[in-house]
Image: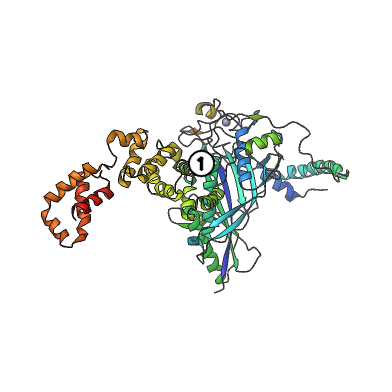
Amino acid sequence: MPEYEAVIGLETHIQLNTTTKIFCGCKADSWFDPPNTNICPVCTGLPGVLPVLNRAVVEKAVLLAAAMHAEIRPVSYFDRKNYFYPDLPKGYQISQFDQSIGKGGYLDLPIPAASAADKQAYTRRVSITKLHMEEDAGKTKNAGGRRFVDFNRCGVPLIEMVTGPDLRSADEAAQYLIRLRQLLRWLGVSEADMEKGHLRCDANVSIRLKGETGLNPKTEIKNVNSIDAVREAIEKEIARQIHETEAGRKIEAWTLEWDEDAGVLRKMRSKETEADYRYFREPDLLAVRLDDAWKQAILRDLPELPLERRARFVAQYGLPEYDADILTAERSLSDYYEAAVKAYGGDPKKVSNWLMNDVLRMLNDAGLKAEDLKLTPAHLAELLKLVDSGKINITTGKALLGKVQESGKSPAAIVEAEGLGLVSDDSAIRAVVEEVLAESPAEVASYKGGKLTLMGWFVGQVMRKMRGKADPNLARQILEELLQ
Amino acid sequence: MSLTLEEVEHIASLARLELTAEEKERYRQQLSAILDYARRLQEVDTTGIPPTSSVLPARSRLREDRVEPSLTPAELLRNAPHAEKDQFRVPPVIE
Ligand SMILES: [Zn+2]
C-alpha cells in the first residue's frame, strides 16, 4: 500500500471571557442561568436598536492576534453575514469578512517525541488564515418533538480563528488545540473550556500520497467538543479516506458529524447549494480604529508566551524539558515557580521537584490555581531552607506544606510553635541512645560480634523514641561512639 | 446588463420570498434597471483610489465592559407567536 499523509486544517471558535456581550450590556456568560435571562433589544434583534462595540472585545482580540504573530489592522470593519436560522433573531450575524482585526499569523507547535511517528520531537509551524471578531448565535434544542430557542448566547463575543491545511496527523491537531487552550488561558482572553463550548472546533480533513503537494477533496467534521474526541474523529476519518481511496472510490466533500456516544462519524444532510451569505459592510457600526496609543496600551499587557517561557526555563534554570513543560502549563504556576526560585536562591531543580511532586498535588486536590495558595513562594523557599539547614527533615517539610496552606503562617513559625524542629542537642540524643542500648543487649552483642548492618535498626529505635525529631546524623555518630 | 430568471429566483430564495411568475419577471426588469444605473458608477476611473467603506471619518463608539439591565424573559416573549418554558417555540428545522 502506498504511504499516505493527512492534511488537516482546524476552524476554531473562541468565546472571549468578557463580562458583557459584544454589542450590548447583557451578561456574556449564561452557563448557570435559565434560558432568555441575559437578553435585551439589541441582542434579540428588535427593530430600531443599534449595536455598540465592547472595548474589551477589541482588546482581547488584539492580544490574541499579537500572540499568534498576526498583523493587526489599524482599521478594521464589521460585516453582515446573512442567513436565516431560528437561533439568529436578526437574520444576520455581525462578523468580519475582508478587513478583519488580524491578518495572517502562525503558531509554532512543539510536537513531543511521544506524538511523532519516528519518536523524534519536532516543531510544526501552523499558519493562521483567518482571525476575526464576531457575535455568537443563540441555541436551539429539541425536546419532545418540539424545538425551543434560547437567546442567551446571542451576541456573546467570539474570535473565529482558522488554520491553513498545515497539520499532518490527528495527534498534531490535538497538540494544536492543547497549545491553543494553554495560550488562551495564559493571555486571559478565554476560559477555553471545550465542554462548555468556550472553544469549539471543526476539522477539515483530506489525504494525499506522501510527497505530493496538492490538495484533495476534504471532508468537514463538526460537533467535536473535547480534544480526545477531535483526535479520535480525525483518526477515524483518515482511516476511512485511505480505505475508500484504496478501494478506488472518490472522496466526496461531505460534512460529517461526530457522534460522541457511539464514537462514529455520521454524514450530515449535504447542502444542495453552496452557502451564499451576501456579506456587506455592517451599516450600523463604524470602522474600528486602533490608533498607536491604544494598541501600545493593549500590548503592554502581552505577557511572555508559554512556549517562550518554557524554553527560557530550560536555558536559564537548567530544567529538563519535562519539568519546564509542566511548570509552564499554566501562567500563575510558572510565575509562582520563578518567585520561589528567586526567594530560595538555591538549586532551581529542587524547587521544581517540590512543586511538581507536592504543591501540584495540593493544587489539583483542592482545585486551586497557584496564585490562590496561602502557601506563598516565599513560604516554600523558607521551608526548603529549613530542610537544607537540617532544622527539619524532609518528612516534616512535606507535612509543613499543608500546615502552611491551612494556616497561612510561616513555616518557621509553625516549626517553632509545634516543636517540629530536629533535636540536635548532643546530650538529649545521647540520653536516648544510652536508653536504647540498655534495652537491647542482644542486638548490642550481635553488632559487636560483627553484624554492622544493625546500625540502621539502632538509629530507627532512637528516632522512634524521639518521634522522628532527632537529627539522624548526630544519632548515628553517638551510636557509633558508644558501640565501639 | 440583464438578470436571468434563475438569478431572481436565487435571490428570492435567499430572502425566503415566494414569488409568482408575474412577479419574477417584473422584479427581473426592475432589478436589472437598478444594476444598470449603478453600473454607470463603474465608468469612473478609480485607479489608485482605495475602496471607501464609509464616508464618515468617525470611529466606532466603544462601550465599557459593564453589565446593564436586560429584559425579563416575559418581556422578550411577549411578541413571540409561540412560547413555552421561557423559550420561543419554533417549527422543526430541516437543513
Ligand atoms: Zn443584549
Q: Is residue A289 visible?
A: no
User: What's the colour scheme?
Assistant: rainbow
Q: Position of residue B23 (x, y in %)?
A: 74, 42
Q: Chain of mark 1?
A: A
Q: Nearer the viewer, residue A53 or A221?
A: A53
Mark 1 neighbour density, 10 Å: few (under 14) some (14–19) many (20 or more)? many
Q: Quadrant of residue A93?
A: top right
Q: Nearer the viewer, residue B73 or A283?
A: A283
Q: Quadrant of ligand 1?
A: top right
On the image, numbered disc 1 is attached to which residue? A191
Compared with residue A183, is residue B59 higher up or lower down, i.e. above or below? above
Q: Position of residue A77 (x, y in %)?
A: 70, 39
Q: Is residue A478 left or right of residue A228?
A: left
Q: Quadrant of residue A455?
A: bottom left
User: The C terminus of chain A is located in which quarter?
Assistant: bottom left
Q: Is residue A176 left or right of residue A216?
A: left
User: Which residue is rendered at x = 60% and y = 69% of the image?
Assistant: A210
Q: Amino acid at mark 1?
A: Glu
